[in-house]
Amino acid sequence: MLELKARGMQKNVGAETGLTLLDMAIKHDVAWGFSCTRGTCARCRCYVAAGREHLATPTEAEESRLEPEELEAGYRLACQCVIREQGDISVTHKPYF
């Protein structure tokens, strides 16, 4: 199960492997801010509260855009963060602005 939280809304949906967190938010009509989908704008920045082990490792774009401390704390870019395997995942949209 994937829990998506953004702009005062929350949806629980089935996690689909191979899709990004942003793909899932768009597919399920969750108001998730984004601009570029390349990992450069960081408007889709999110906090993964649970289920990090079910996600692919950070991409080069994430490592370039996010600080090491952010990645270590559980922040990711939803446009880059791919669901690797089924499991419980909880994500909250946390843009800088």
Image (cartoon, rainbow, N blue to C red):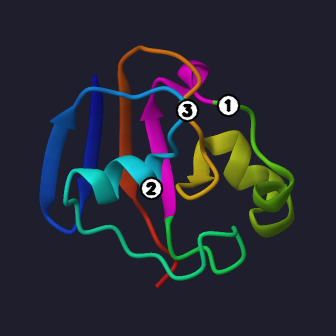
Horizontally, is 51 left or right of 2 in the view? Answer: right
Return the x and y of residue 9 as percentages of the image width and height: 13, 58
Q: Amino acid at mark 1?
A: Ala
Q: Identify the residue at horizontal 35%, vertical 19% (top origin).
A: 88
Quarter of the image for residue 67 reads bottom right
Return the x and y of residue 27 as percentages of the image width and height: 28, 52
Return the x and y of residue 50 as percentages of the image width and height: 43, 27
* Residue at the disc numbered 1: 56
Q: Is residue 78 above or below residue 48?
A: below
Gap in angstroms between the C-alphas marked 3 and 1? 9 Å
Q: Secondary structure at mark 3?
A: loop
Q: Identify the residue at horizontal 50%, vertical 67% (top origin).
A: 44
Q: Residues within 10 Å of mark 1 (few under 14, many from 20)?
A: some
Name the mark on residue 22. Answer: 2
Name the mark on residue 4. Answer: none
Q: Residues within 10 Å of mark 2 (few under 14, many from 20)?
A: many
Gap in angstroms between the C-alphas marked 1 and 2? 14 Å
Q: Secondary structure at mark 1?
A: loop
Q: Amino acid at mark 3?
A: Gly
Q: Amino acid at mark 2?
A: Leu
Gap in angstroms between the C-alphas marked 3 and 2? 12 Å
Closer to the chain start, of discs 3 and 1, is: 3
Horizontally, is 14 left or right of 89 in the view? Answer: left
Callouts 3 and 1 close, C-beta under 8 Å? no
Quarter of the image for residue 2 reads top left
Name the mark on residue 18. Answer: 3
- Count of numbered marks: 3
> Which residues make up the magenta segment?
45-55
Q: Secondary structure at mark 2?
A: helix
Q: Identify the residue at horizontal 82%, vertical 52% (top origin).
A: 68
Return the x and y of residue 51 as percentages of the image width and height: 47, 23
